[in-house]
Image: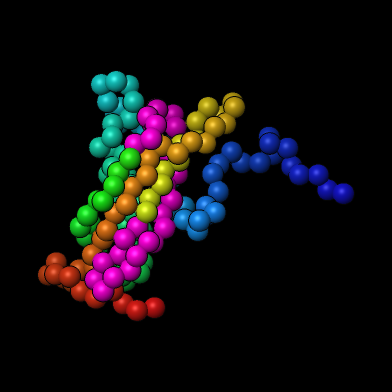
Amino acid sequence: MDTPPSPLQQPAMAPAVLADGAQLVLRVMPLPADVNANGDIFGGWIMAQVDLAGAVLPSRLARGRIATVAVKEFVFKQPVSLGDLLSFYARITRIGRTSISVRVEVYAERNPAQLQVVKVTEADLTYVAIDDQGQPRPVPSA
C-alpha cells in the first residue's frame, strides 16, 4: 500500500480551490515598504490587493472593462506580518444585469518551520461592467 508523501515532500501552500468553490486568484508577499507604524502590513495595502483579486473573476465574466462600485463589508480578522504569504480566494456571489458581486477571502501562510494557514481578511465587493465611455453595460450571458 502506498503511503502519503511526508510533509517535507509536499509543497507548503494553500489549495487552489476552497471547499466552497472559491478560486485562488492572487498570491503575493508584502514587502517592507508595506509596513505601517505598528510593524504590521498597512490595511490600505491589503484593501488594494483585495480589490485587484476581487476583479479577476468579474472581468472574465464581463469580457471587458469593469469598475469597483461598492465594498459592502471588509473585515480584518488578524494582522498580516512581514514574511506572510497571502493567498486571495474569490467566489462570485451574485450576477446582476450590469453588476457582479464577489466574496474575497485572504489567508496567510506563516511560520514556514511550523506552517500555519490563517484567515486574515474577508470582503464583499461589487463590480459593474462598463463600456468604453465608462457607462454601465449588460454582463454577457454565458
Query: Quick check: can you spot residue 55?
Result: yes
141 on left or right of 133 = right
Residue 18 is situated, as x and y percent measured from the top left of the image, at 52, 52
Visible in this render: residue 65?
no
Point out the stretch of residues depicted in magenta.
76-102
Residue at image location 14% in from the left, 67% down from the top: 134
Which of the 4 image quadrants contains residue 131?
A: bottom left
x then y, percent, for residue 121: 37, 40
Q: Quadrant of residue 60?
A: bottom left
> Is 10 situated left or right of 135 in this image?
right
Residue 97 location, x and y as percent?
A: 26, 74
- Relative to residue 115, is residue 73 depicted above or below? below
Residue 120: name its quadrant: top left
Magenta stretch contains residue 3: no
The C terminus sits in image quarter: bottom left
Vertical order, 16 against 46 (above or below) = below
Q: Residue 81 in the image: state x and y as whole percent.
A: 40, 28
Residue at 39% of width from left, 31% of height from top?
78
Identify the image's colour scheme: rainbow, by chain, secondary structure or one colour.
rainbow
Q: Is residue 104 above or below residue 107?
A: below
Q: In this view, which residue lies farthest toward the right?
A: 1
Q: Residue at 59% across / 26% down in the picture?
A: 113
